[in-house]
Image (spheres, grey):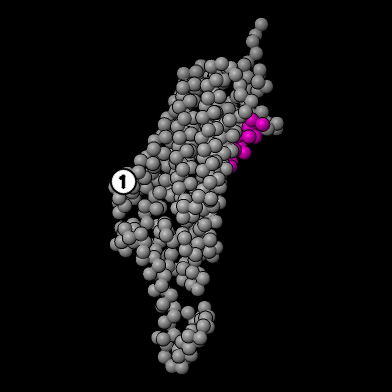
Amino acid sequence: MTMSPPWEDYGLTIADVQSIMSTELHSTILQAFCHGIHTSIFSVALYYIIESMQSIRKRTTLAGIITFLWFANTVILGVQWKYVDLYFIAHGTSLETEFNFDLTGDIPMTIALDIFRALSVFVADLILVWRCWVLYGGNLKVMAIPALCVITETISACMAIVTYVENINFGSASRTNWSLVYYSMTMATNSLCTILILFRIVRVSGVGASLKTYRGIIEILVESAAMYAIIYIALLIAYAYQFYGTVDPVMTAYSYPEVISFSITGIAPTLIIARVMAGQSRPNDSWSRPSLPHMRSDVLSSTESLQFASGPNHSTQTTSASTGHATADIDLEVQAQEIVEVPREQDGDEGRAEAGALASGHKLSPGNV
């Protein structure tokens, strides 16, 4: 009497098993590619931290944070690579042995992966909350909900690891899917922080100034960590569909947003720190000031473009970084004075008429400027 294949007990076919194996391999290759991007961004951020004019204590702290995020991502990739090696090499004698290994897995490796992932997400979310703290001037009312979400996601991550160990050792399955709770709270944390940062950027800069220049678009994408929130929204949807969907018993697409999230968790806060240390971020005190209503949006855009074009070694930008970007407001005032003084440079009655119009409170038309 021949025994039935083990996957038939789970209602799977050979095609389903092969799809699972293919996804395991391809997702690991994608994870290695994303880790390479993270390594490049980490190297550039570390260079800006070393070359910055900040205190040694601050540089050491920020360098330690981005190094830990990169190290955690490297450990996760190493664990996943070893898992694939065991999957296809050590247990690759037959399709049955590969499937049985995929069911049980390697317990220490799985626990190590979950721990490093939870730690990296915790550090990344703390950086987002810190950025919101800076942008809102230390407003405790605004920070209360994001901080509560970080605490809840940390507790749910610990419960997910404990539940996994209990299920393996004692066979007691929890009624609560703590992994789903963890993903939900992580998505809630970074989505809320992203919305708060976006609102603050638009409130200070204005919608026109934020979207008309490359600098404004980059500020929105990087400062808000939008890709961090987007990938966890996709991960939560794919995870919920895989374990609670009724259309397809094998939903392997969950693996792809999962491996991308490993690198995005480190990339998003590293980009924020790199932008701050490179002198491309706004001064901390500028977030508490509203946008200038009497300044035209094209003047603001041209000023931002000029500042963005300056290289990291430019002497003016270095001086601005060391003095808290105190010259940013001076540049805006000089630009405004140039607009006001345009009619004075003109000859004849027309220039005097326009100067009188300015003195009486009338605005120049865009064509005259």
Q: Secondary structure at mark 1?
A: helix
Which residue is pictured at 36% across the width and 45% down the height? 62
Q: Nearer the viewer, residue 163 or 274?
A: 163
Direction bottom: furthest residue: 349
Q: Is residue 79 visible?
A: yes
Which residue is pictured at 38% across the width and 69% down the height? 330
Q: Residue 49 vs residue 260: left or right?
A: left
Direction front: furthest residue: 140
Count of numbered marks: 1
Against 327, residue 95 (above or below) is: above
Circle 1 sits on which residue?
Answer: 57
- The local crowd at label 1, few if under 14, some if 14 to 19, many if 20 or more residues have their Cα within 10 Å, is few
Q: Nearer the viewer, residue 170 or 235?
A: 170
Q: Position of residue 172 (x, y in %)?
A: 60, 19
Q: Is residue 317 magenta?
A: no
Against 219, residue 154 (above or below) is: above
Q: Quadrant for residue 75, please give it.
A: top left
Q: Position of residue 278 (x, y in %)?
A: 36, 54
Name the dominant secondary structure of the magenta segment. helix
* Span shown in magenta: 231-244
Direction top: furthest residue: 1
Against 275, residue 9 (above or below) is: above
Against 227, residue 208 (above or below) is: below
Q: Residue 219 vs residue 45: left or right?
A: right
Q: Amino acid at mark 1?
A: Arg
Q: Position of residue 232 (x, y in %)?
A: 55, 41
Q: Is residue 256 visible?
A: no
Which residue is pictured at 63% across the width and 15% down the height? 5
Placement of the N terminus among the 4 image quadrants: top right
Which residue is pictured at 42% across the width and 30% down the height? 78
